[in-house]
Image (cartoon, rainbow, N blue to C red):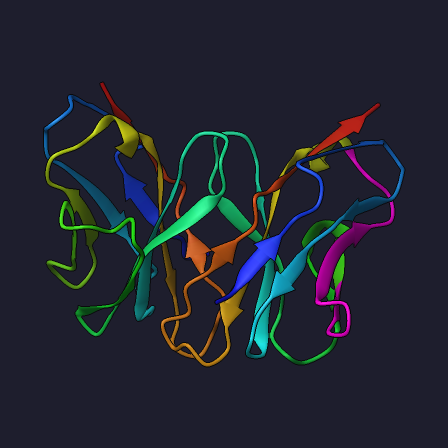
Amino acid sequence: AQSVTQLGSHVSVSEGALVLLRCNYSSSVPPYLFWYVQYPNQGLQLLLKYTSAATLVKGINGFEAEFKKSETSFHLTKPSAHMSDAAEYFCAVSDLYNQGGKLIFGQGTELSVKP
Amino acid sequence: EPEVTQTPSHQVTQMGQEVILRCVPISNHLYFYWYRQILGQKVEFLVSFYNNEISEKSEIFDDQFSVERPDGSNFTLKIRSTKLEDSAMYFCASRARQDREQYFGPGTRLTVT
């Protein structure tokens, strides 16, 4: 069975500081990995995805994530936080071989950005 | 840019009533999903649908739930007899055959009183 663990339910950074949101996954088969962002009272928007190509993935809004198989991690980073980055971030995993392709989500990390 | 739409945005119903949540997936997508998010909790998979049948469902998706694609555009989730614990945000998602990326709708907030 697949699972996702996000360390830290709440992360607070200052504007301009590095953002690091942690995600570890468990999967017995090669995974697809995703980061989604949820702004207040809105749906889920894809930030970036890993689909077995390049291990360093760049997404929208300056975010990127690195797939590290040895660490079973897919941490999300952004060099310089902006106030507009304040939102809930979800890491998700999908089974490469499961054509149904359901997503298994982590608990989410709420990012706060201080001025 | 194509997007997934959902109606209504907010539904209030009494316990025991039936509700139907509606979704219009992106037009050329073939896989459809329902997820729910109880307030303050993570997003949970309910069901996936492909080729006019359920391809996978979770333990949450019991006999009280059903899905349907009544025409070429709508995808619905029905809850036959709502319970208080069904109160949640329900998200519809869709994806193309070749792409693992799922596109989510804005959600329907269901409140059961």
Image quarter of residue A108: top right
Q: Is residue A92 visible?
A: no
Residue in view at x 42 percent, y 69 percent: A101
x, y percent for residue A68: 76, 70
Q: Is residue A87 left or right of residue A57?
A: left
User: Would you place residue A103 above or below residue A29 in this image?
Assistant: above
The magenta span reads A66-82
Viewer-proximal residue, B16 or B33? B16
Residue in view at x 30 percent, y 43 percent: B6
Image quarter of residue B73: bottom left
Residue in view at x 22 percent, y 45 percent: B22
Quadrant of the drawing holding the C terminus of chain A: top right
Q: Is residue A41 visible?
A: yes
Is A115 part of what is drawn in magenta? no
x, y percent for residue B26: 34, 60
x, y percent for residue B44: 41, 48
